[in-house]
Amino acid sequence: MSFASAAWAAAPGEEPQFGPLLFGLAVMVGAARAAGLLAERWKQPSVLAELLVGIGLGNLLPVFLGEAGLTFRSDPALMFLAEVGVLILLFDVGLEADVRALARVGVSSLLVASIGLVVPIILGWGAATWLLPDSPPLTRLFVGTTLSATSVGITARVLRDLGATHSREGRIIIGAAIADDILGLVLLAVVAGMVTAAAGDGPSLSALAILGILVRAVLFLAVTVGLGIFLSEPIARLAGRSGDPDIVLVFGLSLCFALAFVAELLGMAGIIGAFAAGLMLDPYGKGVRTGKANDTLAERLRPLSSLFVPLFFVLMGTHVHLGSLMDLAVLGFGTVLILGAIAGKLACSLGVLERGVNRLAIGVGMIPRGEVGLVFAGIGTGLTLEGRPLLSQSVFSAVVLMVLVTTLVAPMALRWVLDRSSEQGGVR
């Protein structure tokens, strides 16, 4: 998914048109921030508010301004800025990930993540085969891949609010969600590579080519994490001695964009490189110090995240037509996806080996798709197969409906399950 090329040049003899871009930035950034503040007050994920803002803008602006009101939606520069937001988001997720969390709960987290990857893919494939019988096999596979995503950020916030981050359930959920993110990104690289090959834009599609994509993705993540374990501390010390706290932010973003570029060169999505950059700089999720007391790279990154990340979610929302959600076929497919998404993650609890652990909490904690599910869906709309988007408008709307419901319901359900378990003395 690359939008940058068209952002730099106007047609011959024409002046660049910045009006739609400036209008889009003003409306999207302002509305997203206002909605995000309301979401925080109501203890809801900000991504939910940003997506709803996008849906509102996409359906209301044409009513008042005509189709010209949505000109900004297809502005290449704005699409490029939204892609930068996705890279920053995945970089931030990588910074917060702690690879040691996997080791602490080991086999259980890996089993939970593996089941949470495989079962939703099967259910998503089955749902698409049943309700979209004319869809290509790769579309069905991508729908399943989108169902496999888990939002570690949303779950981690609920656990932190309830003081359950260090409980056995919390450790397993966080470890499994991190593993799920890594496995999901590897799977995304494989599926995107298969689509590119099938579309004739890459090497011929074969078992060997698929294996090559898988090996590249695994090696890429393994090498970056391995380098991070040995180099993150020296890099942090050097940056701290510079006397300029901003140097850590500049270096971090440079590494993020550089590894995203390398990932694209290797035939993978740039977000994999951005995620790897975060893991490389902070493999243990303890915070990269800038040289000032209690000041970290994540803190320095927050203003940029607040500006760029909402652009992606609002922009995704503008592509959802409320009319399509009223279509019985789309609504039915979305409902089946919701049920499959919930059932697929509840099945994760079968991977918990320890006794005395609230298995229902594990399954519920893996349900929210949030930002990760939307990133996957956004990439699906950017991929083409046989001259058409891999995910059509109706399929994308159904996926967004699934993301909305799981993101809204899962945090409330997890709070209820953990509160109930705590009252019974079950969370430790």
Image (cartoon, rainbow, N blue to C red):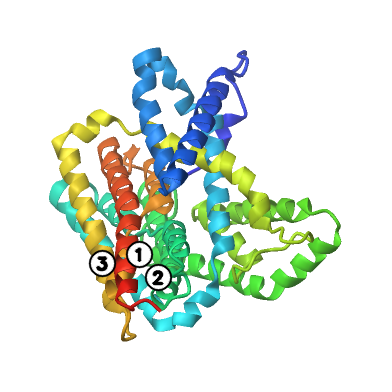
> Which mark, by number, is residue 173?
2
Q: Position of residue 96 (x, y in %)?
A: 56, 63
Q: Position of residue 369 (x, y in %)?
A: 36, 54
Q: Is residue 192 left or right of residue 268?
A: left
How far apart are the two marked residues, 2 and 3, measured between alpha carbons?
12 Å
Figure check: 95 above or below 303 = below
CB within 8 Å, label 2 to label 3: no
Q: Residues within 10 Å of mark 2 (few under 14, many from 20)?
A: many
Q: Which residue carries the number 3 mark?
A: 346
The secondary structure type at the circle numbered 1 is helix
Q: Residues within 10 Å of mark 1 (few under 14, many from 20)?
A: many
Q: Say whether disc 2 or disc 3 marks the residue closer to the N-terminus.
A: 2
How far apart are the two marked residues, 2 and 1, measured between alpha carbons?
6 Å
Quarter holding residue 313: top left
> Which mark, by number, is residue 345?
none
Instruction: Please state, as top left, top right, bottom left or bottom right, where the C terminus lies in the image.
Output: bottom left
The secondary structure type at the circle numbered 3 is helix
Which residue is rendered at x = 40% and y = 82% of the image? 107
Q: Say whether disc 2 or disc 1 marks the residue closer to the N-terminus.
A: 2
Q: Which residue carries the number 1 mark?
A: 365
On the question of residue 197 being in view, the answer is no
Q: Position of residue 205 (x, y in %)?
A: 36, 57
Give the amino acid type for the residue marked by disc 1 in the picture: Gly
Give the amino acid type for the residue marked by disc 2 in the picture: Ile
How far apart are the two marked residues, 1 and 3, measured between alpha carbons?
9 Å
Quarter holding residue 18: top right
Which residue is rendered at x = 77% and y = 51% of the image? 246
Give the amino acid type for the residue marked by disc 3 in the picture: Leu
CB within 8 Å, label 2 to label 1: yes
User: 247 and 276: which one is in front?
Assistant: 247
